[in-house]
Image (cartoon, rainbow, N blue to C red):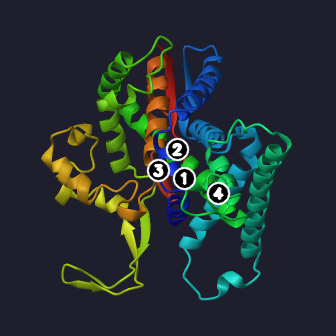
Amino acid sequence: MRSLCRVERHFDAIVYSFLVIGQSMFPIMSRCTMEIIERWSSKDLKRHEIDVFTELKTLSADIIARTAFGSSYAEAKQIFELQQEQMLLASKIQGRPFIPGVRFIPTAFNRRCWRIEKSIEELTLRVIEKRTQCRKLDQHEDAHDDDLLGLMIDAMEHRGMERRTMSMGMADIIGESKTFFAAGQETSSTCMSWTLMLLAAHPEWQERVREEVRTACDAFGFPTSDSLHRLKLLSMVLNESLRLYPPVPIMTRMSNKDVRVGKTLVPKGTVMMLPIVAFHHDQRYWGPDANEFRPDRFRDGSSKAAQSKSTVFLPFSSGPQFCIGQLFALQQAKIVISAILLRYRISISPQYRHSPIVALVLQPEFGIPLLFESI
C-alpha cells in the first residue's frame, strides 16, 4: 500500500479520480463481466458448479488490465501468474524467523525469488515499451491515453505537467504498474468471492439484494453508473463481508515521529503490525454477534456501526495511507455481484470446505465452489 501512496503523490487528484470513479471505467467493467457470464451460460445447464474464487481472479485481472493498462488479460497473463507465485513465496517468508542478511545469500529459494522479480520487471517493461512505441508511430492521441499507464507515461515525458505535481521515471512506472497489477486483482477478487459465499449461505439476504438490484437496472439487465450509489443493501453486504473477511488481514505501519497512544510511548521508527482481522471481530466494538453475518449493523443511522467504522473498520486502511483504489474496487464488486444475482440463484456446494488462509491476502485455501441455478 505504501507504493499506492506514491502514485497519489505523483499524480495528485488526476490519478485518484481515475481510480476511484472514472465514468469511462464503468462500460469496461460491465463488458468484462458480461463476457465471463456468457461463458458460464454457454454450459447450457440449468444448475452447475463454479469455483467463484478462481473465476473472479480471472475476471478482476481482465478488468484491471483493461482499465489501468489498456491491454487484455491474455497479454498480462504471464505477469499475473508470476505475481501469484511471488505472493506465495512472500507468505512463506513471513512464516520464517528473521535472520539479518539471509536474503542476500544465493540459496535456491532466494534465486527463485530473484528470477521471478526479474521476469515481472521485464514483462512489465515490455508492456510499457509497447505503449510508448505506439505513441511514436501514431501522431494521434492513443486510444488508452486516459488509463493509468497513459497518465504515468505522460508524467515521465513531462506532458500535461500543469495537471501533475511530480514527474516519474521508468523505474517508478514499473514499480507502480506491478503494484496495481497485484493489488488491483487480488483484493478485488477476494472481496467478491467472500461476498458471494456469504450471500449463498444467507439466501434471505441474497433475495433482498436481488430485488434491490432489479430496481436499479437498465434495459440490458445492468445497474447504471448513476444508480450504483442507490444499492444500499448491497453496500451493507459488502461492508459486512469486508469486516468478516478483510482482504488484507494484517497491515504494517512505521511511526514517523514519537507518539503516545494512551499510556504507551511509541518511539519514532517503530514498525507496528495492525491485526485488521482481529479489530473486525472484536466484541467490544461489534457486540456479542461479532462473528456473525449481520449486514444491518452497517445500516445508515446505526450509531454503533458509525463508531466502529470510524475506529476499527479498516478494510482499506485509513488516514494518509488509505488505499486509493477503494472506490474503484467497490464499484467493480457492485457491478459483478449485481450481474450474477440477476441471472443466477447461488447456493453453497457440498464440495465447499471453509478454510480461510493468509497468503498476503485472506483467501480460501480450497476455493469457493458454489452452485449456480439460472433464473
258 is higher (above) or lower (below) than 140: below
For discs 1 and 3, the disc positioned in front in the rendered view: 1
Q: Confirm whether residue 365 shows in the render.
A: no
Cα gap from disc 1 to disc 3, whole angstroms: 47 Å
Q: Is residue 148 left or right of residue 373?
A: right
For the residue labelled by badge 1, is the local secondary structure a helix, a strand or a loop? helix
Marks 3 & 2, CB-CB < 8 Å contact = no
Specify the amino acid type for callout 3.
Ser
Query: Rounded to the nearest whole Å, what is the CA distance between mark 3 and mark 2?
Result: 35 Å
User: How far is disc 1 from disc 2 in space, using C-alphas?
Assistant: 13 Å
Residue 349 screen position, x and y as percent: 48, 31
**Which residue is depicted at the point 65% across and 64% down?**
172
The label nearer to you, 1 versus 2, is 1
Amino acid carrying mark 4 in the image: Ala
Residue 41 versus residue 153 in the image, above or below: above
In space, the residues marked 4 and 2 are separated at their CA atoms by: 15 Å
Closer-to-camera residue (283/134): 134
Tell me the residue that label 3 is attached to. Answer: 355
Please name whichever residue, 58 or 202, is drawn nearer the observer in this view of the structure.
Answer: 58
State the separation of the CA atoms marked 4 and 1.
10 Å
Query: Which kind of residue does numbered mark 1 sit on?
Result: Arg
Q: Residues within 10 Å of mark 4 (few under 14, many from 20)?
A: many
Crowd band around label 1 with a 10 angstrom C-alpha radius: few (<14), some (14–19), many (20+): few
Q: Secondary structure at mark 2?
A: helix
Which residue is tagged 1? 163
Reading the chain from its start, which is encountered first: label 4 or label 2?
2
Say which label, 3 or 4, has the lower sequence index.
4
Residue 146 placement (x, y as % from top left) = 62, 41
| Secondary structure beneath label 3 | loop
Q: Which mark is residue 155?
A: 4
